[in-house]
Image (cartoon, rainbow, N blue to C red):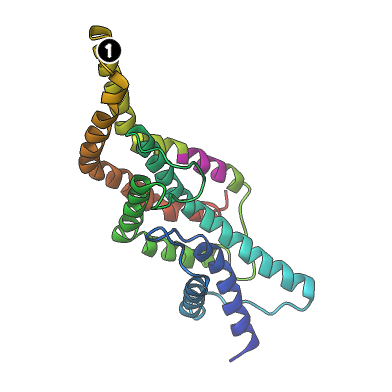
Amino acid sequence: MSVNYLFTWALIFMRSLGIVILMPQMAGKTPPATVRICLGMALATLLVGVVPMAQMPGNDLRFIYEIVGEILLGLTFGFMVQMTFSAVDLAARLSSSEVGLSGSPGLNAPEMGAEPLASFISSFAVVLFFMFGGHLMVISAFARSFTMAPAGAPFINAAAPELMIQQTSHVIELGLRIAAPFIALNFLVNLAFAALGRAVPRLSVFVLSMPVRGLVGFSLLGGVGGLIARYYFNEIAEIPTRLLQLLETR
């Protein structure tokens, strides 16, 4: 086994780390570090025989550049994939708040103990990701990236920062689209009880609106799964294109 073969394996492993480190939570828990490292090693072992062979650099500075560059490129890939899950997390928190189950705010994935409804929607998105073959699309785009940016020559085009900003802004757009039925529901319930409060001033509108909002909200949740799947399928299908656009020369 040559030194170049081992060095190529290490470079592929470093690029894969950025993706496996940013894996989505499953059942409210992040996969252990050992599992993620093993997944990266498995990807490197599968691809080392089919990607162009890298040459061992002759000096330490070049060696450090290639290793760090592969890690940063992998983290960029992982960031683009993670934004898809972040959009669903945003929608899950918005939907939970609109039906009266507000939880603790944050940028991380919802926790089952504090935000049960938001955690359920986020877990549903993870199931859809694997059911629609999103993991296969990410792996195929990852393998294709070595034809555009070979191991040892990490490259991100000049338009990558703009693409990342667009993807970040798309998180808000997608989150609002998914949560739109719950936002509309909350508006209609508040409007109806506001009119009822004007007609019957002695009626405790606030106390009555809470259980009604929750009941109608959970009823809506039973039929909104198809809408979430429709939006999410389109997002998953776009993941390989967005990843390879980071490397595409203009």
Residue pictured at 46% horizontal, 47% vertical: 86
Name the quadrant containing residue 159.
top right
Name the quadrant containing residue 192.
top left
| Number of numbered markers | 1
Range drawn in magenta: 163-171
Query: Where is residue 138 shown, x and y percent of the image?
Result: 43, 61
Residue density around tag 1, few if under 14, some if 14–19, many if 20 or more, within 10 Å: some
Query: Where is residue 203 shown, x and y percent of the image?
Result: 25, 15
Query: Where is residue 139 shown, x and y percent of the image?
Result: 43, 66
Instruction: Quickly name the residue at label 1.
Output: 197
Using the image as rendered, state which of residue 44 and residue 159 is in the foreground. 44
76 with respect to 99 (left or right): right
Q: Amino acid at mark 1?
A: Gly
Query: Is residue 56 visible from the viewing direction of this image?
Result: yes
Residue pictured at 33% horizontal, 45% vertical: 117
52 with respect to 26 (left or right): right
Please tell me whether mark 1 sits on a helix, a strand or a loop: helix
Look at the image and say whether residue 8 sits in the magenta stretch. no
Q: Chief secondary structure of the magenta span?
A: helix
Using the image as rendered, state which of residue 190 and residue 31 is in the foreground. 190
Look at the image and say whether residue 164 sits in the magenta stretch. yes
Query: Is residue 154 visible from the viewing direction of this image?
Result: no
Residue pictured at 43% horizontal, 61% vertical: 29
Using the image as rendered, state which of residue 72 and residue 206 is in the foreground. 206
Vertical side of 169 occupied by 37: above or below: below
Query: Where is residue 163 shown, x and y percent of the image?
Result: 54, 44
Instruction: State which quarter of the image contains the N terminus.
Output: bottom right
* Residue occupying the far front of the picture: 202
* Residue occupying the far bottom of the picture: 1
